[in-house]
Amino acid sequence: MISRYAGISPKGDLILLGRLGEKLKGKSFLHVNSTKEGGGVAEILHRMVPIMADLGVDVRWETIEGDEFFFDITKRIHNALQGNQETITKSMWQHHFEVNRKNAETMTLDADMVLIHDPQPAPLIKFKKSGRWVWRCHIDVSNPVKEISTPLFRYCGKFDAAVFSVARFAKAIGIDEFIIPPAIDPLSEKNIELPDHEVRDILHQFNIPSDRPIILQVSRFDRFKDPIGVIEAFRIVRKYNDCILVLVGSPATDDPEGELVLQEVREHAASDEDIHVLLLPPFSDLHINAFQRAATVVLQKSLKEGFGLTVSEAMWKGKPVIGGAVGGIPLQIIHSVTGFLVHTVEGAAFRIRQLLNNPEMAKRMGEQGREHVRKHFLITRQVRDYLSLWYAIENGLNGQRGFFI
Ligand code: UDP
């Protein structure tokens, strides 16, 4: 399986991966998160787990189960970590813990290395029996609400180490901290090459014209992704340039707010025939791939963003990307080289027009973007980093801020 990445991923990553695989063969690695469908974490795990298995690691992926109240609480925690004022009462924290306790009763938590993704399963640390436990934070914690991050970080501080996507997110929680940005799989259905006719067929299925420039944003319907801002930017652009807007999203089982935000977006788009708001079922990877390939300009106008896999996905397809200058997006978008970083609706509109009016520039940025992703944001680099981290921890090396790309 790893050999399939030869000629795509940087050779040095593949060599190191092979060596680490030899060292860690037969040892057990457990990932725990809160959903198999929707959002970046599930996307990453679906691709990363088989690669680790192929390297000889005894890898498992478990998902905690919770009721509606639990996911309401954890979405509030998520929103507060990204800076929104939220209230989590004592009984809510208790419920968060209780759901984890119940999950711990039925899960096999024994492994040489346990990677707990995000706050939902963080209290599982209380049920650790053996192995090394690492908390993996995928959220933009650049400016969290302290009343909520402090109690959460009390759990996180009990882990052996923490991993963040961006150096600026690292927090003083008293344990080793490592920086590992996420990555995309060039061989997944979402990212493989597609022939033009297949792209056109898929557009046709969704009644999207293929003869007009397409502005695209692919995201869960979440206010931090600023879908309303995208519509407003599009409306400015359309006064001057012919184009259509496609907003694509799908539900995530651990995100109860999606439906409400989708409704807001639909209302805002009103009956504008040039705005296509599509709710796709989970695992519509080929469709997403086709939309990204069909786009003239891709947006990820987030207001907060842990990393934003959609940025690398579009760059890998040779698209210029306009992204909010937040969280993990500036790691991917080198301003004026692989795309543009923006702070406002007007800024986004200005950059969209610049790209629509300069196809040569758009093409050049797309090419540079693809190479940037090839070097830094392919899944082989990510697995390399996780295995290196594991090896480092097992061998008693201190992390501090261990891995920078
Ligand atoms: N995604 C998808 N269908 C959708 C919307 C998003 O498959 O309708 C995927 C998207 O392609 C990306 C992931 O979900 O791979 C979202 O990851 P990202 O890091 O961009 O954001 P998150 O949802 O984790 O905040």
Image (spheres, rainbow, N blue to C red):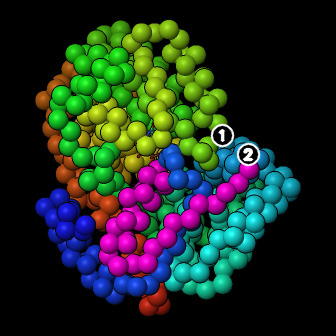
Quick check: 316 left or right of 122? left
Q: Is residue 333 above or below residue 121?
A: above
Quick check: 146 left or right of 234? right
Spot occupied by residue 182 in the image (x, y as percentages of width and height):
40, 58
Query: Could you tell me if the residues under marks 2 and 1 are in contact, i.e. CB atoms within 8 Å?
Result: yes
Check disc 2 and give the amino acid type. Answer: Glu
Quick check: 203 left or right of 357? right
Q: Quadrant of residue 133?
A: bottom right
The mark total stands at: 2
Residue occupying image coordinates x 29% and y 34%: 290
Mark 1 crowdedness (10 Å alpha carbons): few <14, some 14-19, many ≥20: some
Check disc 1 and give the amino acid type. Answer: Pro
Q: Is residue 237 above or below residue 30?
A: above
Mark 2 crowdedness (10 Å alpha carbons): few <14, some 14-19, many ≥20: few
In the rendered structure, which segment of residues is drawn in magenta?
A: 40-68
Q: Which residue is mark 1?
A: 256
Residue occupying image coordinates x 48% and y 36%: 281
Q: Quadrant of residue 260?
A: top right
Q: Which residue is mark 2?
A: 68
SS label for mark 2 = helix
Spot occupied by residue 78 in the image (x, y as percentages of width and height):
63, 50
Q: Nearer the viewer, residue 89 or 292?
A: 292
Quarter of the image containing the C terminus? bottom left
